[in-house]
Amino acid sequence: MAQSQSRAPLQRIDAPDAKASASNPATFIFLHGLGDDADGWTNIAQQFHAANKLPHLTWIFPNAPHNHEAMTQAWYTPTSFSPIPVGRSSAAVGAEAEEEEEEEDEEELLQSVEYICGLVDEEVKSGVDLKRIVIGGFSQGCAMRVFRDARARIGETVGEEALEVHEYEGLGHATSGTEFRDMCDFLETIVPQ
């Protein structure tokens, strides 16, 4: 059985425009990637608010739990989806042991999904319309958003038919100002003030 998940407290940055937020609140739940934490991303919300962008938007930056196998913060064990899991023998493993590892990985993943669903439920209880709650993230955090949608309580998600591709040359596995401007434009479109 997977270990219970312990995590640092989430970071919440409330909308600076209380009037706009009260009349038409919106929330963006941003999930960090493997080995990172909420503190590594809160500056995005602070920069948007300082530029008077998305003043009606509350940002929530949850922390992934500490993953004992990965020895870092992780929404799920990163080896779960690798062809040859790192840290596990590539030699033949008994079917029983392999099945137990898969069940632990699945349980861990589902615990993270349930945590994210709980955050959504809390926002709905506080008065945010479900259609004005956005879940996104970086790397493993983005993958968690997809997993969460698979078990969603939300009737709609942004799918391939609405997908708009942006390429950022030379970016690699990082972020850029251009990418954040595009993210801001996207958020202004789907959760307008």
Image: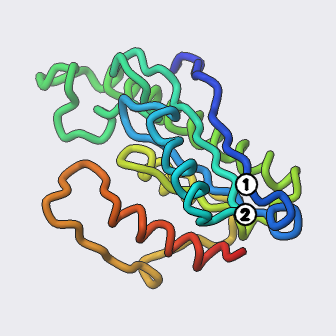
Q: Residue at x 61, y 50 (%)?
A: 29
Q: Earlier in the sequence, mark 1 or mark 2?
A: 1
Disc 1 designates what residue? Answer: 15
Residue 125 spot, x, y in % from top left: 87, 51
- Numbered circle sitting on residue 113: none
Q: Is residue 117 above or below residue 64?
A: below
Determine whether, in the image, residue 176 is placed left or right of residue 157: left
Residue 86's x, y, as percent? Answer: 20, 26
Q: Nearer the viewer, residue 61 or 146?
A: 61
Residue for point 40% across, 32% down: 36
Which residue is drawn at the image coordinates 22% and 30% (left, top)?
85
Indicate whether 183 appears above or below 159.
Answer: above
State the image quarter where residue 179 is shown: bottom left
- Do the residues bearing badges 1 and 2 touch, measured as CB atoms within 8 Å? yes
Q: Looking at the rendering, in which quadrant would you find the C terminus?
A: bottom right
Task: Name the secondary structure under disc 2.
Answer: loop
Q: Residues within 10 Å of mark 1 (few under 14, many from 20)?
A: many
In this rendering, the answer to whether 70 lies above or below 47 is: above
Could you tell me residue 100's position as x and y percent?
41, 23
The residue at which mark 2 appears reads as 56
Cα distance between the residues tagged 1 and 2: 5 Å
Which one is nearer the viewer's eye here, 144 or 168? 168
Specify the color scheme: rainbow
Left or right of 79, for residue 189: right
Type of the residue with mark 2? His
The residue sitting at 55% across, 32% down in the picture is 63
Residue 171 % position (x, y): 19, 57
Q: Residues within 10 Å of mark 2 (few under 14, many from 20)?
A: many
